Amino acid sequence: MKFSQGGSMKSAIFVEKLLFGFAILLLSLTSTAFAAEHRQFSVAQTERTEAITGQIDWPGGKLDRWHGPVVAFVSSGNPNDRDGWLVRAMETVWADRLPLKELSNALVSEGVAVIRFDNPGVLRPQLKCRETILKAGLSADVVRHRCLDARILAGFTVEKYQRSIEAVLMHVQRVMPAARDRLVLFGFSEGLVHAASIADRGFVRLRGLVSIGSPAEPLESLTRWQAVDRMMETLSEFDLNADGIVSNSEIQEGYGRGIGNVMGIEGWFSKTGYWNAENRDVLKAELEAVYAVFRRETDTGTEAGKLEWTSQKNGVLIPDMTDALWHLHFYGQVASAEVMHRLGIPGLFMWGGKDKQVSVPRQVKLVDELNQQGGSIRYLRFPDRHHLLSLRRDLDWVEPGFMPVIAKEVRTFLEHCLSTNTGTQPQVPKVSDTHSERKNVDLYKPIAGPR
């Protein structure tokens, strides 16, 4: 990129994009000591959709006679597989986790059927991408022949992704009638934006929308907050000696300690060596200018644009995101909470109180305002948890002992959604900050396994 500072800013947003619906991605049990059935499926490519493979997990019995709730996972546009694993995960804390598979296990143990699929561009699981990398290491040949199809990824657009998900849902409805009137979409970070867009298109009937770490506001305004306002709000946290001056050395030291939970600090350093009340506006102006440059550079409209590649530590390049996906973050206008309110679809947001990727107070304010206008949107805030509901940090998964708690919260919400009469707008009790009433929910003792 032209700006070194801008490059760091885009890199930071990129990691959030990875979370944002790699966010995408979460939870649960590694034990499967309960009866469960699994069926693989594949949906063929069309002029407007990509071929997708996936599977249905459910508690048992004949699939066409299942009458319980059905949840479909929707993650970000990143090329992760049905288990929630991404090739880039080799360099992250998620390398040894299969979060979508684990979350599916937790929900199935609670009596919920789950639809999950490999995102477009992910090669079929029989090629054993993850297993090969863990055994033989990451190489360009492994990526090309066992993991990802760069040709498909290069043509990836937001609309094609959403249409492909619709094709998956319509296919499942043919083999699983319960998915026709008992379907709820579960979005992970950015994934809720896709889920809400599908709801808004109206081709698939939904009974609810659930999310973890997702924004209620549009991505356009959230991304601006991430790039500018969040950095200004976080700056004071680096004032280690509390003297009203934030020096470059304090920023460096604070970053090493994990203060602010920020992705990178290259654009934070002051040319004068420090920030104080007199020159903070200089930093904000610089951040605004860099944000404006990248917003213009990602204005690709509906075309796929250029495919970006990310370099791993060993130099191997991984095909990643097209300009179309970047465009979604800088220009996306879909506000998931507004869609829920306007269409009368019950919603459940789950946020960590320490989330630095999504401004939770901003989201709560928006949801409260919609509920005052007659909306039916619930939210749960877990005060001591981060973006992915981990106790440790944003870039980590929720602890296994807390996963059953999340699954039970989702089941409770589903019971409400599906108890309402078909064709009427479900009514949800007045929203309260559930976990301010159950303040010690994060102190639950680990639950050994499914009941």
Image (tube, grey):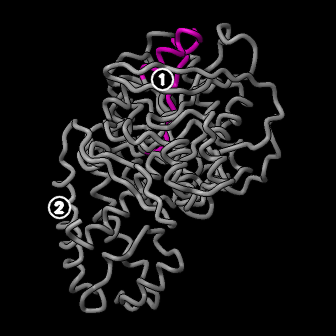
Q: Which residue is mark 2?
A: 293
Q: Amino acid at mark 2?
A: Val
Q: Are marks 2 and 1 in contact (CB under 8 Å)?
A: no
Q: What residue is at 41 percent from the left and 48 percent from the top?
A: 364
Could you tell me if residue 407 is visible in this image? yes
Nearer to the camera, 5 or 292: 5
Segment tinted magenta in the rendering: 166-189
Categorize mark 2 by other alpha carbons within 10 Å: few (<14), some (14-19), many (20+). Answer: few
Q: Which residue is mark 1?
A: 427
Q: Residue 76 at x, y = what percent?
A: 44, 42
Where 214 falls versus 254 (above or below)?
above
Q: Residue 152 at x, y = what percent?
A: 38, 36
Q: Amino acid at mark 1?
A: Gln
Residue 127 forms part of the magenta stretch: no
Of the 4 image quadrants, the one containing the N terminus is bottom left
Residue 179 forms part of the magenta stretch: yes
Q: Residue 257 at x, y = what percent?
A: 54, 79
Q: Earlier in the sequence, mark 2 or mark 1?
A: 2
Q: What residue is at 19 percent from the left and 79 percent from the top?
A: 282
Tell me which corner region of the image, top left, top right, bottom left or bottom right, holds residue 241: bottom left
At numbered mark 2, what does the secondary structure look like: helix, strand or loop? Answer: helix
Distance between the Cα atoms at labels 2 and 1? 44 Å
